[in-house]
Image: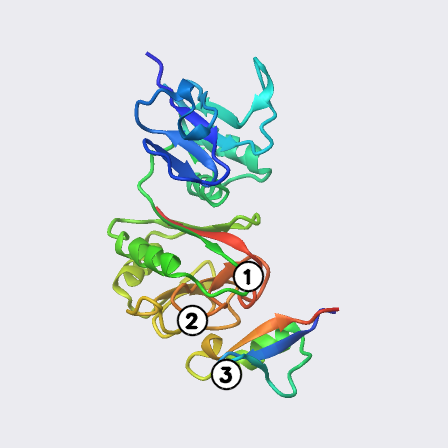
Amino acid sequence: MATTRPFSYNPTSASITGTTNVGTLCIGVSALNYSANPGGLTWWMGPDEDNSYVIAKDVSTSDFPTPVGNVGNVQFWRCANNDNSFRELVGIISGSPKDSVLAATGWLSSNNYWTNYTNITSVTFSQPFVQGTAPTTTVETAWNTFRASLTGSYTQFVVSNSLGFSLTVSDPTGVQTLANALRNATVTGVTINSVSWRIGTGCGSPKIGGVAVEFSNISSCSAGSTIAFRPMINNLNWGGMGTGSTVNQASQTMTLTFS
Amino acid sequence: METYRIIDLRVTPNEVVPGKESVTLEEGVLWIDENGGDCPLCDYTLLINDI
């Protein structure tokens, strides 16, 4: 028996009972009568997921070709259920090769794509950075939730954003040291492939209180960092990557995944 | 070349640091790290100047 689920474009990201949202893509979770347009949306069944990895994305213009005309509000991709096929498929969708499954899933997450890929145990922080704006309490809370979840064994992390930047860092010892330091709020420095990665605890005063734990390259609380996650600094310099100094970075969704 | 101004985040409303109305990105980054004390990014930031 085929495994499928329904999808729709949800332009307001409104919460609809029995469904979940990835950005403005809405995915049916509970057994509803989707032909009755729950949430006022038009729903489309996804492809068969048996022995396949499936990726889905909403089409905001609602003109994707379908058997009943150019009216589709979602788009699907499918490949064999192995890591290489999945990486290659995400490389095609994104327009840039993905050198690891983590890089692939990180790109999908940063760009609000849905996938049924679940074969890795990973922990992800992914939040919007708005240029010139201090982080919200939602972002700060998400950061602490992410840190507290780093309880496993990790050999690599991926930093990526929605502007096309992605970096995979692999090192069994160094990555585990950084994950533990993030979880425990311990000042730490690890050099991997000649790049210094830092966990700092003294950069700003969080809106929600607690310790201002940060993750960056080069140096803690430094304008010289070119990759930084500093959601606790409580001002506009809280992060970014890909274009030089991490001050006044462009708006982007920032994603950090340990696996 | 793009120029930046260094903003003092410790005052409200934020003010341009005197003499730092037009610096390069590299000059601004260096100045902030050297003059920001224990929390350089808590004290200062860079904003790009309009053309």
Identify the residue position indicated by label 1 in the image.
Answer: A131
Q: Is residue A253 left or right of residue A145?
A: right
> Which residue type does callout 3 highlight?
Val
- Residue A53 is at least partly visible in this image: no
As measured in the structure, the alpha-carbon distance from the residue carrying label 3 to the one carrying label 1 is: 20 Å
Quadrant location, the C terminus of chain B: bottom right
Res. A137 visible in picture: yes
Position of A95 compared to A53: left or right? Answer: right
Mark 3 vs mark 1: in front: 3
Q: Secondary structure at mark 2?
A: loop
Residue drawn at x 49%, y 43% as measured from the top left:
A107
Residue at 28% x, 66% y: name it: A185
Helix, strand or loop at mark 3: loop
Mark 3 and mark 2: span between their CA atoms? 23 Å
From the image, tell me which residue sits under label 3.
B11
Q: Hey, what amino acid is under mark 1?
A: Gln
Tag 2: residue type?
Ser
Residue A60 relative to residue A16: left or right: right
Image: A14 above or below A128 = above
Specify few, some or many for label 1: CA neighbours under 10 Å numbering under 14, 14-19, or 20 or more: some
